[in-house]
Every structure is written in C-alpha cells, then in structure tokens.
Image (tube, grey):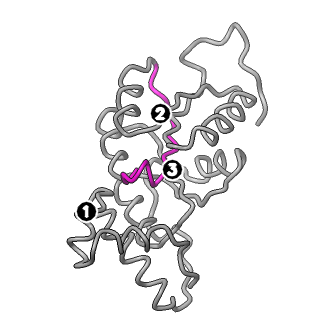
C-alpha cells in the first residue's frame, strides 16, 4: 500500500517502526524505504539505544525490526524489554543466519515473525501483515522437516546456547565447554546447510 504522509495527518495516524540493527547502511536503506511508504522510523544501533529511543518516542512505534546479532549481543533479549514498555508492540527478528532454535526462541519471547536477510521492504511489511494478532502459533512457523546434517545440528545448538546466554560469547563458550576463540571461529562461519 503506497501512500504519502500529508501535512494534515495527525501524529496518532502515522505508522512508525523502530529499527534496531548495528549495520548503519541497512538501517538507512530500510528507513528511506519506509519513508517512501509514509512510515516514520526510529533507528537504534544497540539494545541500550533502542530502549532509550523507544522510551522517549511519543507516540511509541507500533512495529520493531530487530537484528538477531547486535555487535555480539543477542537481539532476542531486547524483545521482552520492549514488550514490557509497550505490550502492543509487534516485533520481527531479522538475521543472516537463521536456525530453527532461534526462530522458536524469538517466537517464545514475543516476536510475531522471523525473517532471513536480505529481506526487502515488501517482505518486511508482509511479515507484519501476515499475522492477525500479536502472538503467533509456533505451529505457523514454516519449519523445514528434512533431517539436518551433523554440522547443521551443531550450528543450531551453538545458536541456542548463545541465545540462552543473552549473546555473551564467553559465557556461551564456558557452557559449551570450548575455548572462546574456537567458538568465535565457529560463529564467523556461514551456517551449515541442512
């Protein structure tokens, strides 16, 4: 739906998004694309900045696009913090490295959808429109039922452990019984295909 915000529109009728991603190029592109659709946006590059921006916003953004990896921190832990401020917020998580474990975890924490990067503006807007309510059934998550490879299972297990430790690499390495540098090397690799 293309429309432009006219001068007569009141603040209460303007849709707005909170974009939380440490990639300033991505946030700029997404913000400009939303603007072309008549949607205002607030940009944050860290969890702390997102909470401050969200608290100060009046009116509060109705939607949030949150990157899974925020400078080594898990974007998943930001979801409940934002929902505590405004339970009506609809959040989607975006990542370049999707896994079933993190998708399910995002949904449990209150995200309404989960997208893999790169996603264009239409896919992002559709992700918000594809759900009829703030909560989504985990059965609605499109999960691949193929038997995953051992490398894929290891990668998903590491992602789950990372989410359980709020993105803290040192704590994750300790919980997995591996050296921190070994874990960092594994995290830098692309996810194994199923």
Q: Is residue 90 above or below residue 142?
A: above
Q: Position of residue 194 (x, y in %)?
A: 56, 85
Q: Residue furthest front?
A: 181
In whole angstroms, how far apart are the C-alphas of marks 2 and 3?
Answer: 15 Å
**Residue 68, magenta (yes or no):** yes
Q: Where is residue 3 in the image (x, y as percent from the top left)?
A: 77, 27
* Residue 44: numbered disc: 2
Q: Name the residue under label 3.
A: 92
Q: Where is residue 187 in the image (x, y as percent from the top left)?
A: 44, 68
Residue at 57% x, 28% y: name it. Answer: 41
Q: Quadrant of residue 87?
A: top left
Instruction: Please state if 172 lies on the left or on the right of 5 as rendered.
Output: left
Label 2 crowd (10 A; few <14 / some 14-19 / many >=20): many
Instruction: Please state if 36 lies on the left or on the right of 150 as rendered.
Output: right
Q: Is mark 1 on a helix, strand or loop?
A: helix
In whole angstroms, how far apart are the C-alphas of marks 3 and 1?
Answer: 27 Å
Q: In this view, does 192 lie above or below 74?
A: below
Residue at 70% x, 8% y: name it. Answer: 7
Q: Name the residue under label 1.
A: 170
Q: What stretch is highlighted in magenta?
A: 59-75
Q: Position of residue 128 (x, y in %)?
A: 58, 47
Q: Do the residues labelled 2 and 1 touch (CB within 8 Å)?
A: no
Residue at 65% x, 38% y: name it. Answer: 30
């Amino acid at each position: 739906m293309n429309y432009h915000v006219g001068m007569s529109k009141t603040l209460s009728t303007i849709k707005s998004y909170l974009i939380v991603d440490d990639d300033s190029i991505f946030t700029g592109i997404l913000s400009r694309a939303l603007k072309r659709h008549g949607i205002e946006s607030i940009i944050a590059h860290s969890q702390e900045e997102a909470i401050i921006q969200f608290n100060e916003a009046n009116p509060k953004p109705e939607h949030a696009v949150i990157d899974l990896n925020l400078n080594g921190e898990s974007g998943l832990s930001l979801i409940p913090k934002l929902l505590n401020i405004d339970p009506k917020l609809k959040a989607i998580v975006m990542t370049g490295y999707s896994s079933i474990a993190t998708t399910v975890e995002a949904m449990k924490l209150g995200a309404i959808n989960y997208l893999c990067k790169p996603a264009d503006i239409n896919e992002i807007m559709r992700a918000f429109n594809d759900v009829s309510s703030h909560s989504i059934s985990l059965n609605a998550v499109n999960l691949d039922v193929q038997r995953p490879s051992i490398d894929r299972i290891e990668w998903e297990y590491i992602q789950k452990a990372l989410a359980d430790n709020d993105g803290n690499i040192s704590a994750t390495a300790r919980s997995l019984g591996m050296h921190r540098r070994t874990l960092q090397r594994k995290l830098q690799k692309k996810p194994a295909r199923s």
